Amino acid sequence: MSNGTSITEFLLLAFADTQELQLLHFWLFLGIFLAALLANGLIITAIACDHRLHTPMYFFLLNLSLLDLGSISTTVPKAMANSLWNTRSISYPACAAQLFLFLFLLSAEYFLLTVMAYDRYVAICKPLHYGTLLGSRACVHMAAAAWGCGFLNAVLHTASTFSLPLCQGNAVDQFFCEIPQILKLACSDAYLREVGLLGVSACLAFGCFVFIVLSYMQIFRAVLKFPSKQGRHKAFSTCLPHLAVVFLFISTAIFAYLKPPSISSPSLDLVVAVLYSVVPPAVNPLIYSMRNQELKDTLKKLIQSLVFQQQ
């Protein structure tokens, strides 16, 4: 195969060799997918319907749930279909679309988590300026910037990756299309341009990480000075879930993309990909609802109203 235009489809990595295990993976993914849809859907509905939750923090949480829904819907349904029908194929356009959408939503989520760190910093360290710095217009602009930066990042990487000549076959060693696996199929030295773009993105991501770390250093310093134990507990209850989501997101992504080649294997890459692409969208709603009493109360009322309507 001389270039990408001669490839009409890619072959994704199968979860197992036997049909029985393939079906087991299908049911497992189906359960995780439905749980993610239900949990994120409930959070979106609760925030949209309860006027008490119409605040910057919950506005950004609503955006996070939308991104989680989008990211898990980009990869898991195709993987379930392949497991159910015992196939590995994905068309060239579908692979490009999957890579673009996943990268777009993943990048936007990371930028949004950075914005959410700023929201918590202003709320705790500069409470008197909160209404000014994080008014409704400012929140919309910051959320739009996160989505826009994610879109731009995805366009650049998708265009660069799929303009490469591919000479190493069409077997992708992953259950969805991702940049590192497509680069393995590129001709010798042809991938250096995309590697350069990845380096720029890594520097930007590191800058966001430093901003998040510095923000939380200031936050914890301010919280520990609170005279009231109840005030400290309330501050931690709004910050710790966000910090847990950031840690889960960054740690799994870093291990996926920066692990040493010596420990890389198809089975390990598969497990790591599930950890950073499938688990966070399903777990994030649980993390945010565990310590947030306002959200838990709203979710409880919403579930009760849905149950009563069914009776």
Image (tube, grey):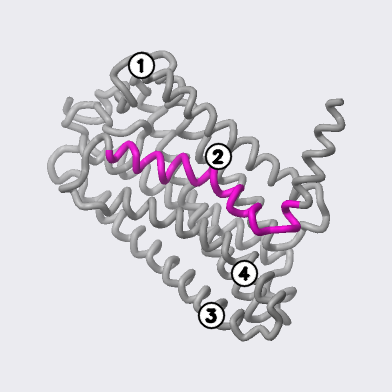
Q: Identify residue type, mark 4.
A: Phe
Query: Do labels 3 and 1 touch, CB within 8 Å?
Result: no
At mark 4, the secondary structure is: helix
Q: Identify residue type, mark 3.
A: Gln
Q: Position of residue 60 (x, y in %)?
A: 64, 57
Placement of the C terminus among the 4 image quadrants: top right
64, above or below 85, in the image: below
Q: Is residue 32 left or right of residue 1?
A: right
Mark 3 or mark 1: whose residue is earlier in sequence: 1
Q: Identify residue type, mark 1.
A: Thr
Q: Position of residue 184 (x, y in %)?
A: 21, 39
Give the residue at mark 2: 70
Mark 3 or mark 2: whose residue is earlier in sequence: 2
At mark 2, the secondary structure is: helix
Q: Position of residue 294 (x, y in %)?
A: 75, 57
15, above or below 119, in the image: above
Give the residue at mark 4: 236
Mark 1 or mark 4: whose residue is earlier in sequence: 1
Q: Residue at x 58, y 52 (%)?
A: 287
Determine the CA span between mark 3 and mark 1: 51 Å
Q: Identify residue type, mark 2.
A: Gly
Eye-nearest disc, 4 or 2? 4
Give the residue at mark 3: 218
Judge by depth and name the residue closer to the eye, 278 or 190.
278
Query: Do labels 1 and 4 touch, CB within 8 Å?
Result: no
